[in-house]
Amino acid sequence: MNSVQVCEAAGLLRGARRAVALTGAGISTPSGIPDFRSAESGMWQQDDPLEVASIYGFRENPRRFYDWVRPLAQTLRTAQPNPAHLALARLEAMGRLTSVITQNIDMLHSRAGSRQVLEVHGHLREVICIACYHMMPADEPLAAWLDRQELPRCPHCGGAMKPNAILFGEQLPAKVFTEARLAAKKCDVMLVAGSSLEVFPAADLPAVALDAGAKVIVVNREPTYVDHRAAVVIRGDVAAVLPALVDEVAYVGV
């Protein structure tokens, strides 16, 4: 971690009037949640996502989806927010961050204390029937699957219920994504943390911010397509970099 870069990023956040964060899978891997693409732990290394995690595959064979997602769901059951999540919540509490836009479905930002969270790929708080669209809290049906392998079924029509997370072939939640695009257009600083910026349309949000005149800070282990346009690029572990960054913002702001 380069201390000069951390100071530069802190200066941008300190001077921002409307800073937002965009987070991806890399912010949750320190909590033990695997990402989808890395060679070491990516969930796509063994399975074709268009078969197991598409809406078409789910409609054809929901049990196969639930079999595939079982290890992830078990991990999410016990995962806790890590220092990166807590740092962003602290930054919001300091009045330095207006919202967190996240590609993650794990709900760890909310559990860390962030209040304004835009979950553009959905979440696991609810399940929704693919037949009649009845929606209900996810805790009981997901627990029934994990503990007794009972496929979540709609209590109204008996249809298969899927987590309220976006599968391949589904549109992003319109209201939430519209809010995210508006936040990107109105922000003066965007902090990209733990995202490879490879999944569109969410990955287009930094470009939206840049085109509107915002400064972009990238904190990620690997290069992203916006690095050459970013004001600051920090290579490193978000769980180490973000707390140091927020400490620097707080220290200078005293």
Image (spheres, rainbow, N blue to C red):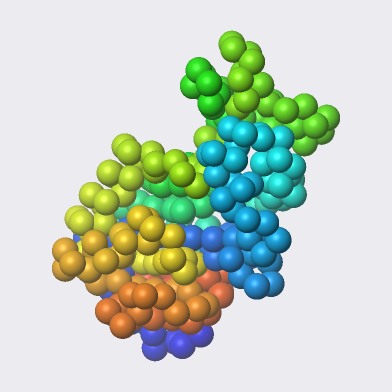
Q: Position of residue 16 (x, y in %)?
A: 24, 65
In the rendered view, tell whether residue 222 sits above or below residue 147.
below
- Give percent across and percent down for residue 154: 62, 18
Pick the front one: 249 or 217: 217
Q: Nearer the viewer, residue 51 or 215?
A: 51
Picture mark count: 0
Instruction: State the quadrant of the C terminus.
Output: bottom left
Residue toward you, 58 or 114:
58
The image quarter containing residue 82 is: bottom right
Residue lying at the far top of the rendered structure: 156
Asked whether residue 235 is in view, the answer is: yes
Q: Residue at x 63, y 47 (%)?
A: 52
Residue in the image at 83% along x and 30% along y: 148
The residue positioned farthest toward the right in the image shown: 148
Q: Residue at x 30, y 78 (%)?
A: 230
Give the percent coordinates (x, y) of residue 27: 54, 63
Residue 96 vertical placement versus 166 (above, below):
below
Residue 48, given in percent of the width and then of the height, sits at: 63, 56
For residue 54, side relative to residue 33 (left or right) = left
